Every structure is written in structure tokens, then in C-alpha cells.
Image (cartoon, rainbow, N blue to C red):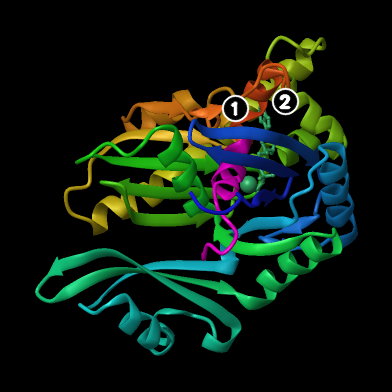
């Protein structure tokens, strides 16, 4: 428990989330949580495009929440990161660290000079003298951009995580991993769906799908001929809160259609996972991300995948002082906090 928690800073394509956690003997306490919407196209395909807007929002969030900690943990996702489970001859982690740069080359579709490579042993005894290793490669130019915006906002990047692993850490704190069970964490954001299938607490499959609830915003914009902001408003207003019944009906129809598209993509990934792994039955799917709230999504996922689906509460097991926070407001924001909570559990000096 040594060291101070880093600030969790989740730069998503629709909004930035910031969190500060503090750990002591009693547990993990919430010190600050807030979010700020970004203009459209500020983040495209995991790459930061509108530096000015992002830096400005980070500064506003830090000031408004009186955050004095400077060390930050960010995370990357989508096309800028590649995660692969590979089999290697058994070796110590020191030997692995030495050989990985060379080993990695054959598994990564980018020039090895352009990526940061990290490894984690997930199964030290996979049989026949082999071990399973998770290889993580993230593009240097994308990491460089994250480090730059953080620096421009007056902060310091002390860890670069991956969205799917941040989710895993969030889940471990809140729920723990049931032994001898396989669960799927699915985070549906605006532009990316992160999937992490975990068996006995170990990642067995991850995938980022470049699709998300932003699709519904785009559909509403197109069909109702409204701006991005108006479309976001209709989408998040909740059924029954749109006074014009024609618009309400249209939003409902589009929500159904887009949810089906998202579910089909998620199913395709999980089918691929099932086809390439033995003893695979997923006992439960835990859903997070802002788009988990698109009304028919949970129902359609359950029906199509035939697996129980539960909305994750990232604040579960985090101690929240009701004198300092509006607990109801926090619970309403909870689905979007999943990645930030995982980042905020990291300490300065932690690696990827
Ligand atoms: N109540 C709601 N109903 C439907 N959609 C919602 C609701 N609240 C938020 N969303 C949608 O969730 C998305 C934002 O979720 P999230 O914050 O997880 O994504 P992000 O981190 O910004 O994006 P990404 O990680 O995909 O780049 C937006 O598309 C937003 O419209
Ligand atoms: Mg996100």
C-alpha cells in the first residue's frame, strides 16, 4: 500500500473523467470524481486530435476539484494498442524482460521501434515447459501525445495503462474474481467497446472494437437533422423525458437498432473467443461505459448471448463521504467511471 494513488485521467472520445482515490487501512476513499464533455472529434480512433480543448478541460477539472496531486495515470485503447497472449518456454521474469524486445517482433504488426512493449506472465506453468505471457504493445507516438497534453495541463504522467486492464483492476476491487469461473467485462463507450474475458482472475482474451454509442448520436443527428449536442441530449434524456412524442418514438427505434448492431459486434468477438479457447463458458457479463445505459442494450445482450448481464458499479467498495459528495449524482455517473477508477488505483511507479 506504499505510495500515493495517481490521479486517474480517462480521456475518452466524448468526455474526460478525472478521479482521485486515497488508500488507507480502512480501504479506498473517494477524494474527487468529475467529468467534462469534449467537443466532437477531439479524440479520433484513440488518438488525441484537439489538444487545446483537451488541455483546457483537464485544467478546468483539476482546478474545480481542487486537486493538488500532480502524478497521473492515463490509459490507451483501440488501434494504438495490441494485446496478445503468446506461449514461450518457461523462464524467469528477468529473462523474459531481456528477451521480449526480440521475441515481440514476430507478433506485432508495427515496427518494433514504434512501440513500447510490456509483458506479463499470466500462467507460469502452461504445460510442456511452456508458459503463457500477455504481450502488450502500445504505439509510442500515441503515448507521446498523452504525455504531452498531461504536461501542458501542468501534470505528470507516471503510468500508462490500457483501458481493458484498468477495467480489470476496477472490477477486482469492487467484486473480486470468483474462483473457477469465467466472466466477461464489457465497457461500451462512445467510440470503443473494450472486452476483457477473465478466467480465475487472469485475462484470457481481450479485444477493442472500434464502435460505440457514438453511433446512436450520429444516427439521431442524421434522422432528426439536429446538432451533435441536441442528439446527445435526446439520447441521454431518458425515455419519457422527451416531450415531442414523434421524436421520442424515433429515438427509441434508433436506440433499438444501434443496440442490436453493438450486440452483434460483441457477440462476434465472444464467438471468436469461444472458438479459440477450451473450457470457455462465460458465467456472467459485467457491463460498464456510458453506452451501457442505452435502454435496450442489456436486454438485447442477455437475449442474444444467453448469459446473465449485470451493470457494474465502479464505486462499489469505494468509501464515499456523503458530506463531501452528492451520492445520487455520483451513482448516476457511475457507468462512465469504470476506466478512471481502475487508473486511480495505480500508484506512482507502477508499470503498464
Ligand atoms: N443515459 C444514457 N443513455 C444512453 N447513452 C448514454 C447515456 N449517458 C451517456 N451515454 C453515452 O455514453 C457515451 C459516453 O460513454 P463513455 O464516457 O464511457 O465513453 P468515452 O470514454 O467518452 O468514449 P470512448 O472510450 O469510447 O472513446 C456517449 O456516447 C454518451 O452519449
Ligand atoms: Mg472510454
| Disc 2 CB within 8 Å of nearest ligand 1 atom | yes
Question: Horizontally, is 325 left or right of 4 in the view?
Answer: right
Comparing 63 with 271, the one in front is: 63
Q: Position of residue 228 (x, y in %)?
A: 83, 39
- Circle 1/circle 2 CB separation < 8 Å: yes
Residue for point 47% across, 38% down: 263
Judged from the image, the secondary structure of the residue bearing numbered disc 2 is helix
Tell me which corner region of the image, top left, top right, bottom left or bottom right, holds residue 334.
top right
Residue 100, horizontal then vertical, whole percent = 39, 83
Q: How many marks?
A: 2
Taking the spot 49% from the left edge, 77% from the top edge, the residue there is: 117
Locate residue 67: give its quadrant.
Answer: top right
Which stretch is magenta?
337-352
Q: Residues within 10 Å of mark 1 (few under 14, many from 20)?
A: some
Does residue 103 show up? no
Secondary structure under the numbered disc 1 in the rendered image = helix
Q: Residue 236, labelled with which disc?
A: 2
Outermost residue on the left side: it is 128
Left or right side of 132 for 168: right
Q: Write the residue at 59% across / 33% down.
A: 29
Q: Nearer the viewer, residue 299 or 18?
A: 18
Question: What residue is at 68 percent from the left and 36 percent from the top?
Answer: 216
Q: Earlier in the sequence, mark 1 or mark 2?
A: 2
Task: Identify the image quadrant of residue 64.
Answer: top right
Residue 12 against residue 152 in the figure, above or below: above
- Ligand 1 quadrant? top right
Q: Is residue 223 magenta?
A: no
Magenta includes 339? yes
* Residue behind label 1 places its C-beta within 8 angstroms of ligand 1: yes
Q: Which residue is mark 1?
A: 293
Q: In this rendering, would 279 be left or right of 168?
A: left
Amino acid at each position: 500500500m506504499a505510495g500515493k494513488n495517481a490521479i486517474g485521467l480517462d480521456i475518452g472520445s466524448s468526455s474526460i473523467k478525472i478521479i482521485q482515490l486515497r488508500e488507507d487501512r480502512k480501504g479506498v476513499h473517494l477524494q474527487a470524481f468529475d467529468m467534462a464533455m469534449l467537443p466532437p472529434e477531439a479524440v479520433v480512433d484513440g488518438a488525441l486530435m484537439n489538444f487545446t480543448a483537451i488541455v483546457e478541460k483537464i485544467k478546468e477539472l483539476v482546478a474545480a476539484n481542487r486537486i493538488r496531486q500532480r502524478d497521473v495515470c492515463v490509459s490507451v485503447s483501440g488501434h494504438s494498442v495490441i494485446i496478445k497472449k503468446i506461449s514461450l518456454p518457461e523462464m524467469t521474469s528477468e529473462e523474459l524482460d531481456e528477451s521480449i524486445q526480440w521475441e515481440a517482433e514476430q507478433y506485432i504488426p508495427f515496427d518494433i521501434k514504434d512501440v513500447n512493449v510490456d509483458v506479463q506472465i499470466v500462467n507460469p506453468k502452461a504445460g510442456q515447459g511452456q508458459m503463457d505471457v500477455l504481450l502488450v504493445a502500445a504505439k509510442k507516438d500515441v503515448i507521446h501525445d498523452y504525455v504531452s497534453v498531461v504536461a501542458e495541463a501542468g501534470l505528470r504522467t507516471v503510468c500508462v495503462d490500457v483501458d481493458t486492464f484498468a477495467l480489470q483492476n476496477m472490477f477486482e476491487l469492487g467484486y473480486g474474481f470468483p474462483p473457477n469461473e469465467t466472466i466477461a467485462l464489457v465497457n461500451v463507450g462512445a467510440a470503443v467497446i473494450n472486452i476483457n474475458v477473465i478466467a480465475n482472475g487472469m485475462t484470457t482474451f481481450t479485444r477493442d472494437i472500434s464502435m460505440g454509442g457514438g453511433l446512436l448520436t450520429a444516427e439521431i443527428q442524421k434522422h432528426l437533422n439536429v446538432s451533435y449536442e441536441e442528439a446527445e441530449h435526446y439520447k441521454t434524456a431518458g425515455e419519457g423525458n422527451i416531450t415531442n412524442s414523434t421524436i421520442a418514438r424515433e429515438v427509441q427505434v434508433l436506440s433499438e437498432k444501434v443496440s442490436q448492431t453493438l450486440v452483434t459486434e460483441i457477440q462476434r468477438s465472444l464467438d471468436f473467443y469461444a472458438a479459440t479457447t477450451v473450457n470457455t463458458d462465460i458465467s456472467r457479463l459485467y457491463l460498464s461505459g456510458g453506452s451501457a445505459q442505452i435502454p435496450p442494450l442489456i436486454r438485447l445482450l442477455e437475449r442474444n448471448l444467453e448469459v446473465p448481464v449485470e451493470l457494474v458499479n465502479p464505486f462499489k467498495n469505494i468509501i464515499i463521504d456523503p458530506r463531501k459528495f452528492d451520492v445520487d449524482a455520483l451513482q448516476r455517473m457511475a457507468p462512465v467511471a469504470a476506466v478512471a477508477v481502475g487508473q486511480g488505483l495505480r500508484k506512482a511507479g507502477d508499470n503498464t
